[in-house]
Image (tube, rainbow, N blue to C red):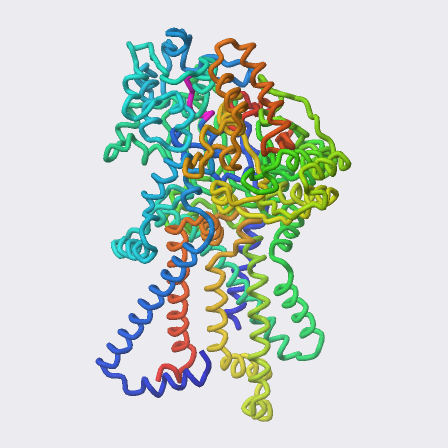
Amino acid sequence: MDQTSANGQREAGSGLTLPSNLVKVTGVLASLIMTFIGLTAITFVIGRLMPADPVLAIVGDRASQEVYEQVYLQLGLDKPIYEQYFRYIGQLLQGDLGTSIMTAQPVADDIKRFFPATLELATIATLLGVFVGIPMGVVAAVHQGRWPDHIVRVISLIGYSAPIFWLGMVALLIFYANLDWVAGPGRLDVYFDGIIEPMTGVLLIDAAMAGDWEIFQNALSHLILPASILGTFALAYIARMTRSFMLDQLSQEYILTARVKGMPESNVIWGHAFRNVLVQLITIIGLTYASLLEGSVLTETVFSWPGIGQYITNSLFNNDMNAVLGGTIVVGVCFVGINMLSDLLYRLVDPRVRG
Amino acid sequence: MRKLRSILLTVTTLVAFGMGPSQAATPSNTFIIAKDIADIITMDPAEVFELTTGEIIANIYDRIMMFEPEDLQTLVGGVAESWDISNGGKTITFKIRPGLKFHSGNPVRAEDVAWSLQRVVKLNKTPAFIITQFGWTPENVDGLVKATDNSHVQITITEEFSPGLVLNAMSSGVASVVDKKLVMSHEKDGDLGYDWLKSKSAGSGAFSLKTWKANEIVTLEANSSYRHGAPGMKRVILRHVSEPSSQRLLLEKADVDMARNLTPDQVKGVKGNSNIAIDGHPKGTVVYMAANAGHPILGKTEVVQAIRNLVDYDSMANSFLAGQFVVHQAFWPGGLWAALETTPYKQDVTKAKSLLAQAGHADGFELTIHTLTNSPFPEIAQAVQADLAKGGIKANIVTLEGKTLWPKYRAREHDIILARWSPDYVDPHSNADAFAHNPDNRLEAKLTGVLAWRNAWADDASNALAVKARNELDLAKREQQYLELQAMLQKKGPFVIMFQQNEQVARRNNLQGFVSGSNFDLVFYRNVNKK
């Protein structure tokens, strides 16, 4: 959200009353419902238009026609597509996401298992992007056209353009196979599997809650490399955008005034220019985080990371619609949730938005 | 700024804390396999038909008859101690071994054996055809498969089948003996425990299923009171690693004991590593091309014969397929009983051109090859494309995922398919029934499980010989009939059989005793040990 719209919100919100709050909440709810219907309907139709046969995913290519037809009917594929969709929505409203064809497990259970893995990865990657990317962007803007700027540009370019699959393999080769600094593919060494009870599904949190620091260390050792690879992409994007926003602010007259008045340079940069790009940065960080939460299939594949990206992709290839829709809903909820969180953060960092 | 600095410090500390490798080697009592296990969709032996689960249930369940890892050529009793054939080969009575126990502690009874077969027929999942072909239906199976007392099970077939074939079928996954008491305690709405057994185990084999997390891990735990003694490893872990390069790294770092899906390049790459050994295991999978006989040009015998003569089998086997596939040109895999080992075809462009001229296509024609996306199929398709061009045949290649390719194949919507096939059980009838026997070629017959039907090909002589061999009681005659049938299909029919798989398995060389037989479910973990 840019500053103009933030100002717009301030004006509209300046005289909020209870009914207008209700209108706002109703609006948000209506938009959520529309998003949800649109998301599931489009995914459902695309899934059904794909040439992959979900029945063969279950029965295999050698099944007799009798077995094939039996499963075809069980899946309700003889019904019109709109009827299949409404049946799914009906189940969903009762809290039933259905059962996955590919894992034979309830989709809700699969999501509980796969999503925390992605959440863990995406969160660390985003944090890396934020804590390294923002300072890099600021430094590049302050030293525009000089060597720090060039270095940041090269790093950003690599982060953008290097194939993540290749980057992952090279990183594994160097840091896991040769230097032995980190653990290899997977979330945990297999000997630790099943030792701690999954409370949140996020291994670092579960291990810390269980007080098992050996598992915590092992999980962290497995996480660092994929998170760094994924973080490189986040870092490149955030650094580029920070640089661009900062350059815009640094050319403003108030910055010139501050410098003329003799304000220390660090105060000018961090206290004034940086504060004014925060709202835009929150939007960028929010979008980056949301896109990482969709799961990164390539990173997950190279690092054997059982995340939601691989889950949705494999399910889509096998036309496992319950799993695809379940995954899509989770991703949709993430996007909406992060947008709402961004709105809240605008209010925290920008007094004009608070009204 | 101070806040930012402290956050950065915390992050750095955490990263430093996380630095450090995992354990240097796998535990001495655990066998860890890196494998793509995404194909697992069920653990129920009445439904299992996937490669990975095929081998898993072979280690969890004892079957009525078995090929044991100590001698993969000889069919012996599994749960059955002995058997008696009567009624002109139509009735077999099995005597159940005394003193066997399931993992649950329940005794293995004749009732469990009969119920396991009845359950397969009643559930009627994909692999059920292996035993329903004997004339068993949900309605009659209770009468035809029954426990006659506490230690005897009698099966009666209503169709003409060689008893040898029936015994071989009793060594397939559907003949796994399931703990009736345990499974039925989890029955829901008359589902015979189907929902429960999808992700659990109830067997009496060398291992039991501890955990299955789809696309992540399968853990098996040793059955210390197994009838052949406790397995060498306390635990077997199959870890899902879909990327072969990652499998290689894990193996080289000793984080796994075995990598099952290395590409030929990676196998070559690890060959110099003194800690790693490469084993070749000939498998029953054959790679073939099939021409749709309903196609106006491909339906001509001379055209398919020309294609057989255009393909340069040796060149492929010696280059990009090196070590992983060998030339094989008959439908029943080499190394097995009744296999035809001759390879009469080599690339002969002159002969191929003359055959095309005889068929009236001296100027060539255009066709499409449909194949799978995964290696080595696209590579083989490209090599075949170049070979066919030498005869003036312009081949277009379309690669598809299996779930998209099979519907086309089953609907006869292809010109040429390049695919693979492996036997369902260790009897030549398994492949003869698919390649050589098509009793009803009408489109509406929908014999979609039969390859000959999928290619719209039926031949009276081939049908008759397949049935004759299936029913033959004399073993020597039966073998001869299958050899004749394979030779017949080398000369006519829609199939160009090209290669047989040789599974290359890379393992840490301190690990021994892994046995992988010709069929997909003849893989045994119980003799594995570490030096």
State yes or no: residue B519 in magenta: no
Q: In this orientation, which residue lies closer to the viewer: A58 or B521?
A: A58
Horizontal relation, residue B431 to residue A17: left or right: right
Can residue A326 be seen at all in this image of the molecule?
yes
Magenta segment includes B59: yes
The part of the chain drawn in magenta is B58-64
Residue toward you, A94 or B255: A94
**In percent of the image, x 50 and y 21: which residue is there?**
B464
Quarter where residue A11 is shown: bottom left
Q: Point out the image quarter for the N terminus of chain A.
A: bottom left
Nearer to the camera, A253 or B429: B429
Report x, y in % for residue B14.
Answer: 53, 55
- Note whether residue B229 is visible: no
Q: Is residue B278 left or right of residue A234?
A: right
Q: Quadrant of the C terminus of chain A?
A: bottom left
The residue positioned 63% from the left and 30% from the top of the image is B500
Residue A124 x %, y %: 50, 58
- Position of residue A103 measured from the top left corner of the image (x, y, whole percent): 41, 42
- Kindly give the residue lying farthest to the right in the view shown: B350
